[in-house]
Image: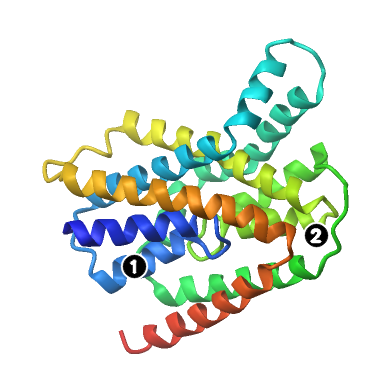
Amino acid sequence: MNSWDAILLGIIQGFTEFLPVSSSGHLELGKAILGDTMVAEESLLFTVVLHFATALSTIVVFRKDIIEIISALLKFQWNEETQFIIKIGVSMLPAVVIGLLFEEQLEAFFGGSIAFVGAMLIVTAVLLWLADRAKNTGKPVTFKDSFIIGISQAIAMLPGISRSGATISTSVLLGNDKSKAARFSFLMVVPLIFGKIAKDVLSGDLSSESTNFTTLGLGFIAAFICGLIACTWMIALVKKSKLRYFSVYCVIVGLLAIVVSFFA
């Protein structure tokens, strides 16, 4: 992988991690288009670095919220922030269980099957279309809602299913406030990303003799900057009910991926 490829994939990851179009799906499509010649360990390392970059961008965007949550949590009271942390924990359960029990099966879906990615993008499009038509409310995310949203996050481990699209859409369809749904969706993934990174580091799967730190750095910077832009933009789009445009985009890209797969 050269520097320009790393920057391009970083841009794809940065924008698609937050915009509801599936970052994993677009990375798979991007690697297929560019010709992913990296060895498995190097490819995994690069993907982990990009996810780390977007996790950091989430922390930067929601830094005030995170500081308030931590400060309130240290008071050891049953307040709104403490409940929010517990809800985040509840939302993580489905993804943790499925990720641990079916890790090999999930990895099999990341084998370059662009037809499968295309089909999942169309599923994402349907979710976005339904969510965009839902009425906005002032209802907060409940403990029950957080578990159901967590199931959506677990399903979104499949390439082509947008994590932000699936979780925000599920939350909105459950009747939750759109801005609160977006906030919960973005913050709930941060612990999972860092947990996955820690697991990969401890497993030793990230070691690679052919590691190019220049390409890793360029990809990281591109993903971080684009993540900042996309996260802020997405919050505004959810509030204004503009998800239908991404629904159309997912349908177009999904159909193109399916068509191209027949000629690949």
| Residue underneath mark 1 | 30
Dot 1 falls on a residue whose secondary structure is: helix
Q: Nearer the viewer, residue 109 or 131?
A: 131
Q: Residues within 10 Å of mark 2 (few under 14, many from 20)?
A: some
Residue drawn at x 40%, y 74% is 114
Q: Would residue 4 appear left or right of 167 to someone viewing this image?
A: left
Q: Which residue is mark 2?
A: 173
The mark that comes first in sequence, 2 or 1, is 1
Q: What's the residue type where badge 1 is placed?
A: Gly
The CA distance from mark 2 to mark 1 is 31 Å
Residue 259, above or below 189:
below
Is 66 situated above or below 230? above
Q: Residue at x 38, y 62 (%)?
A: 27
Which amino acid type corresponds to the residue marked 2 in the rendered image? Leu
In the displayed structure, 215 sits above or below 83; it is below
How packed mark 1 is, by other alpha carbons closer than 10 Å (few <14, some 14-19, many 20 or more), is some
| Residue under the image location 28 percent in, 39 percent down | 205
What is the number of callouts on the image? Answer: 2
In front here: 75 or 22? 75
Does residue 105 appear anywhere in the picture?
A: no
Estimate the x, y position of residue 160 in percent, counting from the top left.
51, 66
Kindly identify which numbered label has been placed on residue 72: none
Q: Colour scheme in the image? A: rainbow
Horizontal relation, residue 208 to residue 70: left or right? left
Q: Quadrant of the C terminus?
A: bottom left
Q: Are marks 2 and 1 in contact (CB under 8 Å)?
A: no
Residue 106: x %, y % from top left: 46, 54
